[in-house]
Image (cartoon, rainbow, N blue to C red):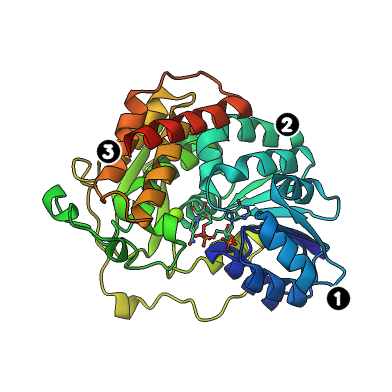
Amino acid sequence: MKKIAILGSTGSIGTQTLEIIRSNREELEVVALAANSNVTLLEAQIREFQPQIAVMWSAEAAAQLRVRLADCKTRVLQGMDGLLEIAVMPQAQVLVTAVVGMIGIRPTIEAIKAGKDIALANKETLVCAGHIIMPLARERGVSILPVDSEHSAIFQALNGEPADRISKILLTASGGPFRGWKRERLASVQVEDALKHPNWAMGRKITVDSSTLVNKGLEVMEAKWLFGVDLSQIQVVIHPQSIIHSMVEYMDGAVIAQLGVPDMKLPIQYALFYPDRRKMENNRVDFYQLGSMTFEEPDLETFYGLKLAFQALEKGGSMPTVYNAANERAVALFLERRIGYLQIPELIQRSMEQHAVVEHPGVEEILAAEQGVYDYIKGLV
Ligand code: NDP
Ligand code: MG
């Protein structure tokens, strides 16, 4: 029995992870669940999966949950202390990091120190702290198993080949709902428009990130850390059908791709059972129906959030944190309708311009850079 803890169990990735576990109850067991404030869904999940620990980030929600669960054995904890307790609990073997944002950094580091394998969806963690997490994982002998569909595809296409045989990573992107648009047209984009992704149903933040191509920028950084390649070896390819989930070009020119219908359950299941494959129903590509697949170069002038990601990675140190934190805050402000759509990349750019890079930042310095960006944006908006 593989014992699994999930941070962010009520979200898009979290609920799909529980679907996989539900279909594999004789092999997978839930030992802990955590969410931000969705008491009703977390209660239902606890009643179904009977974890030993449950965490709510919000104190108020934790208090409510305790009352509702008076008849259950599950211990209810709260806040960062609760997340850290899940990270190190001896009963868990795999930690699924499916929270959104930089909140995942500290629990992920503690879980690695405690020897847990990480099924990593929370890309923001690697973006900001990849230089801490990857060496630590190697030192402790734990696996970082990618859940993000592109990185799972690359992981599958690599299949144990040594990194020095890779010539290039071809990271595919759907291009989002505004592919082909220019800036003038993007100026009028409303929250509802940005939340309509053509191929994937995901949480709100990542859906907006996909529309700006900032998600691809974060994924470029995630790929660099996961696969140990240089920035110059990562190429973004727009592929609107989202059937090829990414590819690896080898030194001899061979390109190996992973294909499938756009469904996160496959990469989640692959991470949970790695190195094994398990059966999965209703997710076959019908090539007769599909007909054709197309490819384009990304428009880096219009979607310059992606270009800024390459610049942030080139500057290194604390700059990727600034890129990520500025985007997190800008997307939150956009979703609250307090800024316009085009202000998202603009706030990222301005935040990066005013930041003095800290080399090799530790966790405290990463969190300080994040706070610095929040303060800066607060002064602007
Ligand atoms: P969602 O917004 O759907 O879910 C986020 C989850 O995290 C919810 O369970 C939420 O709880 C919980 N959460 C948020 N803040 C906290 C906190 N402070 N403490 C504890 N729990 C918290 O996000 P997604 O599932 O879409 O994305 C999760 C991560 O996976 C992101 O990093 C994203 O980039 C990545 N990812 C997602 C993909 C997808 O298909 N959705 C694909 C690839 C990567 P509550 O419900 O109570 O708010
Ligand atoms: Mg992805």
Ligand 1 sits in which quadrant? bottom right
Q: In this view, does 226 lie to the left or right of 344?
A: right
Q: Residue 139 carries which label?
A: 2
The residue lying at 36 percent from left, 43 percent from top is: 253
> Percent x, y for residue 94?
73, 54
The residue lying at 29 percent from left, 48 percent from top is: 339
Quadrant assignment, res 244: bottom left
> Percent x, y for residue 126?
55, 39
Q: Is residue 14 left or right of residue 303?
A: right
Name the kind of residue labelled 1 in the image.
Asp
Q: Can residue 254 be seen in this view?
A: no
Q: Badge 2, how many Cα within 10 Å: few under 14, some, many 20+?
A: few
Q: Can residue 3 be seen in this view?
A: yes
Q: Cα distance, mark 3 to mark 2?
A: 39 Å
| Nearer to us: label 1 or label 3 | 1
Q: In this view, does 24 lie to the left or right of 350?
A: right
Callout 2 secondary element: helix
Name the kind of residue labelled 2 in the image.
Glu
Q: Cα distance, mark 1 to mark 3?
A: 51 Å
Which residue is disc 3 drawn over?
346
Name the kind of residue labelled 3 in the image.
Glu
The front one of 158 and 213 is 213
Which residue is disc 1 drawn over?
71
Q: Earlier in the sequence, mark 3 or mark 2?
A: 2
Q: Badge 1, how many Cα within 10 Å: few under 14, some, many 20+?
A: few
Q: Is label 1 in contact with label 3 (beta carbons under 8 Å)?
A: no
